[in-house]
């Protein structure tokens, strides 16, 4: 198992999710700060149903917490357990089992890794984190659909690169979600980076040429949902507040839609944002990919790949373009002629209710 290490980087740190460089903050070869041990017995798993503290996963609402407090694995790395009782209705708004929700799995894995980094690797809680890339695959959809227990998420950090101010230039980690028998049902690989929260306004001003970014809180009261919002059933949802695309159409053989999420949706926008977060873009991409099938409710997303190259701004339209390949549906988010996010979705027929219930 690879240990989490610090590296010296000689290039200027990249701006989170933007593809441009951030204001000067030299990288160093300094070691990571001493890791605080937040549990008296760090290898003991918490009681079932116990949720991690909200501040350790950067969430404002309890119903958005999807994992337990982390623990150290005896062989290295960290463990967490999903907690899917009492969660937001957003994660259950599907025609099939909620455990097959790619967004739930990605968010649970993000929370598992972030809480472990804070609890055991000494990273400050005063850091704003941003996705660089996400690669998630449900490796056994049938067994996951039939599972009636929570998953164990095992996280292994591979790299930690620090700036001179101690914030992470990049953290990369891999994870597996296993059932009680230890069978791997989900795998992820993610890369994130961070910046001290007090430097975030400077970064955003730099990226926007000095203009202030609007916020979801400021825009929420004036938002009017689009008349051409996709019907929930056409994107494998049941509730309109969870629909994130509008104006679906075909242009020169490309399936196109406009990004149109509900800014009052506390699962998509758990707290105030000055840009569209990664999970909103993935949700919209998933919906557009599913809308191109003959029966959206009869399909599930079994794999997601995404790279986030620029901030997705709130004050300019975003167009999603989907192209069907042999296995993957490629979806680009385009704003002002620039691809801000590249995604790919693998779709499969939804497993039968008893799929995966056979022998181990």
Image (tube, rainbow, N blue to C red):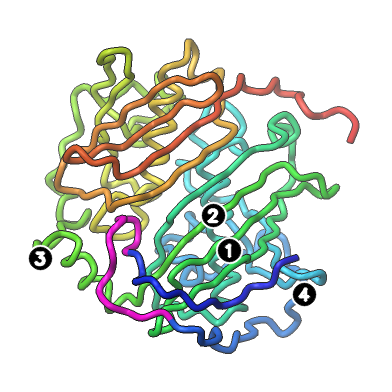
Label ID, residue 355: none
Label ID, residue 43: 4
Q: Position of residue 119 (x, y in %)?
A: 59, 77
The magenta region covers: 15-27
Relative placement, left or right, of 167 versus 188 is left
Residue 22 falls inside the magenta stretch: yes
Front tag of 3 and 1: 3
In the rendered view, would you say 186 is above or below 31? Answer: above
Question: Is there CB contact under 8 Å for labels 3 and 2?
Answer: no
Label ID, residue 113: 1
Q: Nearer the viewer, residue 289 or 60?
A: 289
| Dominant secondary structure of the residues highlighted in magenta in the image | loop
What residue appears at the point 61 percent right and 76 percent down from the top-left corner? 5
Relative placement, left or right, of 7 versus 342 is right
In the rendered view, would you say 258 is above or below 172? Answer: above
Residue at the spot of label 3: 210
Of the two numbered discs 4 and 1 on the same chain, state the one appearing first in sequence. Answer: 4
Mark 1 residue element: helix
Q: Position of residue 89 (x, y in %)?
A: 47, 42
What residue appears at the point 67 percent right and 63 percent down from the top-left corner? 156
Q: Position of residue 357 (x, y in %)?
A: 82, 29
Front tag of 4 and 1: 1
Residue at the spot of label 2: 190
Calculate the distance from the C-alpha at mark 4 to the C-alpha at mark 3.
Answer: 48 Å
Relative placement, left or right, of 2 versus 201 is right
């Amino acid at each position: 198992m690879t240990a989490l290490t610090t590296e010296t980087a000689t290039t200027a740190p990249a701006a989170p999710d933007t593809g441009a460089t951030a204001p000067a903050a030299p990288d160093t070869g300094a070691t990571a700060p001493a890791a605080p041990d937040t549990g008296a017995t760090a290898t003991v798993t918490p009681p079932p149903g116990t949720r991690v503290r909200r501040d350790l996963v950067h969430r404002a609402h309890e119903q958005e917490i999807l994992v337990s407090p982390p623990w150290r694995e005896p062989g290295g790395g960290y463990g967490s357990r999903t907690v899917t009782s009492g969660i937001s209705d957003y994660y259950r708004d599907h025609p099939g089992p909620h455990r097959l929700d790619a967004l739930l799995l990605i968010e649970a894995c993000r929370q598992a890794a972030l809480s472990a980094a804070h609890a055991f690797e000494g990273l400050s809680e005063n850091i704003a984190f941003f996705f660089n890339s996400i690669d998630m695959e449900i490796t056994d959809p049938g067994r996951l659909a039939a599972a009636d227990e929570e998953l164990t998420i095992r996280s292994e950090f591979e790299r930690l690169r620090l700036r001179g101010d101690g914030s992470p230039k990049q953290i990369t980690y891999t994870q597996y979600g296993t059932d009680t028998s230890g069978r791997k049902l989900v795998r992820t690989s993610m890369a994130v980076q961070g910046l001290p929260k007090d430097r975030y306004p400077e970064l955003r001003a730099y990226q926007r040429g000095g203009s202030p970014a609007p916020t979801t809180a400021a825009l929420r009261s004036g938002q009017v949902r689009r008349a051409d919002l996709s019907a929930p059933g056409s994107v494998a949802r049941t509730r309109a507040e969870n629909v994130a695309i509008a104006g679906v159409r075909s242009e020169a053989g490309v399936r196109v839609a406009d990004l149109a999420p509900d800014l009052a949706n506390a699962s998509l926008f758990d707290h105030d944002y000055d840009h569209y977060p990664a999970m909103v873009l993935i949700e919209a991409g998933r919906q557009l990919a599913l809308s191109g099938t003959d029966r959206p409710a009869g399909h599930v997303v079994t794999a997601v790949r995404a790279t986030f190259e620029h901030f997705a701004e709130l004050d300019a339209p975003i167009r999603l373009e989907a192209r069907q390949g042999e296995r993957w549906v490629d979806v680009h988010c385009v704003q002002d002629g620039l691809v801000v996010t590249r995604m790919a979705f693998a779709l499969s027929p939804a497993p039968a209710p008893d799929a995966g219930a056979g022998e181990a």
